[in-house]
Image (cartoon, rainbow, N blue to C red):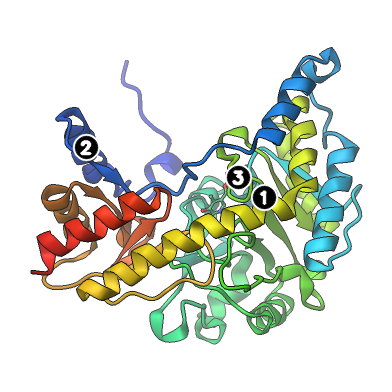
Amino acid sequence: MNIEFSERLKQLPPYLFGEIDKAKKKAMDEGRPVIDLGVGDPDTPTPDIIVKKLQEASTDPSTHKYALNKGLRSLRVAMAEWYKKRFGVILDPDTEILPLMGSKDGIAHIPMAFVNPGDAVLASNPGYPPYISGAIFAGGEAHMLPLLKENSFIPDLDRVDKSVAKRSKLMHINYPNNPTGAVCGKDFYARTVEFAQKNGTIVCSDAAYTELSYDGYNPPSFLEVPGAKEVGIEFHSLSKTFNMTGWRVGMAVGNAKVLEGLGNVKSNIDSGIFTAVQVASIEALKNSESIKARMNKVYTERRDTLVDGLNRIGWIVDKPKAAFYVWAPVFGKYDSAALAKAMLEKADLIITPGNGFGKYGEGYVRFALTVGVDKLKEAVERIRRSFFV
Ligand SMILES: *Cc1c(COP(=O)(O)O)cnc(C)c1O
C-alpha cells in the first residue's frame, strides 16, 4: 500500500536540524568529548520539594483518574496568585486561566479554534517552530514578523502589509525571546494592543522565559498593559522556571472567550494533566521566589563565563538580559549552518544554527546555557584554538 502524508504535513517547513543531528549522533558514537550547547532544556534537576510532592501525591488513588476538564481548581488558584504577585495582573481562576500540557500544547492548538482557511497568522521570526506549524495545521497562512538586530529584535508592526494585517487572526510574540535573548518593554506591548484592536487580531504572548533574567531586570507580562486582556492571552510554563520540561505543565491566561475556544479544542484532544503533577505544580508556584533566585544565580555565572569568554577571544556577542541563550553573529565565510557544522567538526561543540528558527535567523548561531561553568570555559578555549588563532 502506498502511504502518503497529508498535504498539511507536507506543507511544514523543512526540518533544518537534520544534518546537525546526524553529525551529533556520529560524534557521540565515536566517543568524542562533545559539549552540547544546542538544546534549550535545563540540565539541573527539578527541585526536590517538587519531586517529593509528586511522590506523595502519586500514592493517593484519587489522583489516578482522568483529570476533569480544567483540572484542579486549587492549581488555577495558585496560578492566579502567582500572576498577581509576580506581575500585578488579576485573573479569574474559573474563566481566565486554562492549564495546559506544557505551553506548546496551547501554542500549537490555538489556531484550530480561531483560524479559517485563508486567514493569516503572524509569527515573530526567528521563532519557536509551533507558531508556524500550528497555523499550517489549521489551514491558515503563516506570515513572519522579522526580528532584526537594528530594531533590537522587536517586530516593526508598521511594516506589516496592510492586507495581511487585515486578514490576521492571530499573532505570536515572545519575550524574553528564544532564540535571540531579546527583551521588550511595555511600550511594545502597548503598540501590539493597538495593532490588535485595529485589525481584529488575537494576540498570543509566549512568556516562557520571564523568570530567567539577569542583573535585577524583571521582564513584564503582556497582560500588564491596558487593553491586553480584551485582545489576547499569554502562554506561560513551569518548564524553564522550575526545570520541569518533562512534566508538561503550562498555562494560558487572559481573555476568557479566547480561552474558551482553546479549551473546547483541547477537550476533544487530551484529558488533562496527571493530577499528581498538578499537585506538585502548586508546590512549585508557591516556592517560586527561592527557586528562581537560585536558578538565576546559576545562569548569571554561566552567561558571564560564556559571553565574557567569547568577547575576550575576539568573538563580539551581546550579553542577554533574560532567557538562557546567547545569540551570536556568524563570522568569516560561514553562514549559520556551516558555522554550526564547523564547530562540531573542529571543536566537538554542538550549537544551533539560527536558520533552524526560520529565515530571519540566518547570520546567527544560538548557544544554550545548559551546561556548567567548567564546560563553558572549555568551550570558549576550544573555539579560540579552532577559530581565533
Ligand atoms: C521552551 C519554550 C516554551 C515552553 O514549552 P513547554 O511546552 O511549556 O515546555 C515555550 N516557548 C518557547 C519559545 C520556548 O522556548
Query: Is label 3's Cβ within 8 Å of ligand 1?
Result: yes
Q: Measured from the top left, where is residue 107 in percent x and y?
A: 61, 50
Three-letter code, disc 1: Ile
Q: Say what secondary structure mark 3 lies in.
A: loop
Which badge, 3 or 2, comes first in the chain's sequence? 2
Looking at the picture, does residue 189 appear above or below residue 324?
Answer: below
Query: In which quadrant is the C terminus drawn?
Result: bottom left
> Which residue is label 1 attached to?
291
At horizontal 71% and vertical 35% (from top left) the residue drawn is 49
Q: Which of marks 1 and 3 is in front?
A: 1
> Which residue is label 3 attached to?
239
Rendering quarter of residue 213: bottom right
Q: Say what secondary structure mark 1 lies in.
A: helix
Which badge, 1 or 2, comes first in the chain's sequence? 2
Mark 1: give few (<14), some (14-19) or many (20+) Cα within 10 Å.
Answer: some
Q: Say what secondary structure mark 2 lies in.
A: helix
